Amino acid sequence: MPDSIQRAVEVLKAGGLVAMPTETVYGLAADANNVLAINKIFSSKGRPSGHPLIVHIAQPELNVPNDQQATSVTWQEILSQWSRDVSPEALILANQFWPGPLTMILPKAKNVLLEVTGGQETIGIRCPQHPLAQQLLKEFGGGLAAPSANRFGRISPTTAEHVHEEFPGNEILVLDGGPCDVGIESTIVDLTRLDTDGAVILRPGAITQTMINHALDAGVEVDRVAAKTASTTSKSDTSNTSVPRVSGSLSAHYAPRTKLLVYDPKDAKSIFTKANETSGFKQVAWVHFPKDLSANESGPKNVTKELVLPVESRVFARELYAMLRQLDALNLDCIFFEQLPDGIEWDAIRDRLGRASVGSGL
Ligand code: TXA
Ligand code: MG
């Protein structure tokens, strides 16, 4: 085991915090079964205590890889430690998308701390893909509660340097796993009201509703069989009357301090002119997709920083938060940001950019 992982495990066992790289964003991890450690997460982030945390778990080691039924039974056993009712749908999604950028909301098991779930009877759970996260989880040997490693409401970190910016000083051990591959937070799917609403996306992400529907529609029979035979829990109590709280669903979130204005290129000229006349911006950033120069498009006045956006949604997601941080650090008066193209692959990014814009300039 590398020294850094060993140190991190010691810190976690002693009730401390470790910044853990995942494929989505860096998380601020603590032992999910240690109330004092969980409280440290809330105080470090400045996060209201009613906001639930996601519990991260290790990928199971299988004797027979690619044996779907064995995998389902194993997921059933693991998830039963955290959820009192592991539905066939949960197993299908675990089989299909874990390890990966998907968080499932399930009815919580009795032993799961209410401090972790924000007082709710449900738990958010995810098996991340980043090799360092997996190694840490395996060596730690338990669940790690981890929100994104940023101060409440601010931009999620996608590099170890970003975490250091959020938490200057040395009180948090940061594991450096390089830049995050996905770059935006996991998709959150609520599986606690399947009977009435089906699988409901609470926060869009790299795993889309279409992918989830497709997986559930194509749900392989073995998952259902495995769920029935391995289930040790009662099916009678699946109702969840409490309203799920997702801080990522606040309209202002993931936000830079600089005012962020998302514009439609059709109206660019008038928006730029108006903003300049009414606000008298002295220094602005212009962030846009590659321009067809023959179209004679021009940017706002007083551009001190111009960035050209990636046209591929996956690359865009990977770079978005680093870009917003970079722009925010320039202390400009405004960031003019060209609106995103249509299409489902842009939905999660549109969601984050919208919230960043609403919460900006505060
Ligand atoms: O990609 C991610 O999900 C990252 C990495 C570190 O795994 N984590 C992350 O955590 O984004 P956080 O705390 O920043 O956002 C988790 C969201 C919160 O908005 C929280 O309200 C929601 O998940 N959540 C957690 N448990 C929940 C539950 N039981 N019911 C409803 N929402 C829940
Ligand atoms: Mg967050």
Image (cartoon, helix red, strand yellow):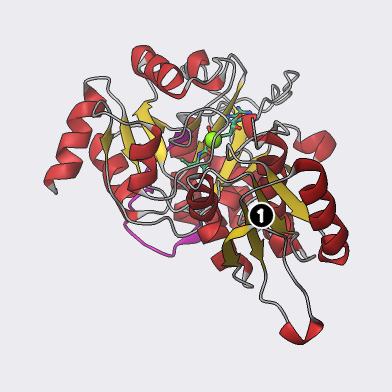
| Residue 197 drawn above or below residue 290 | above
Amino acid type of the residue that numbered disc 1 sits on in the rendered structure: Ile
Snapshot quadrant of residue 119? top right
| Residue 172 drawn above or below residue 112 | below
Side of 32 relative to 308 (left or right): left
| Residue 153 drawn above or below residue 283 | above
Does 69 lie within the magenta span?
no
Q: Position of residue 236 (x, y in %)?
A: 71, 23
- Front residue of 227/253: it is 253
Residue on which the image places disc 1 = 349
- Front residue of 240/120: it is 120
Side of 13 relative to 93 (left or right): left
Secondary element at image label 1: helix
- The answer to whether residue 218 is visible is no
Does 67 lie within the magenta span?
yes
Residue at image coords 60%, 52%: 92
The crowding category of the residue bearing disc 1, from other C-alpha atoms within 10 Å (few below 14, some 14 to 19, many at least 20), is many
What residue range appears in magenta? 55-68
- The answer to whether residue 300 is visible is yes
- Front residue of 158/164: it is 164
Q: Position of residue 333 (x, y in %)?
A: 63, 44
Snapshot quadrant of residue 279? top right
Residue at image coords 31%, 27%: 17
Magenta stretch, main secondary structure, is loop
Residue at image coords 44%, 53%: 23
Q: Position of residue 134 (x, y in %)?
A: 33, 48
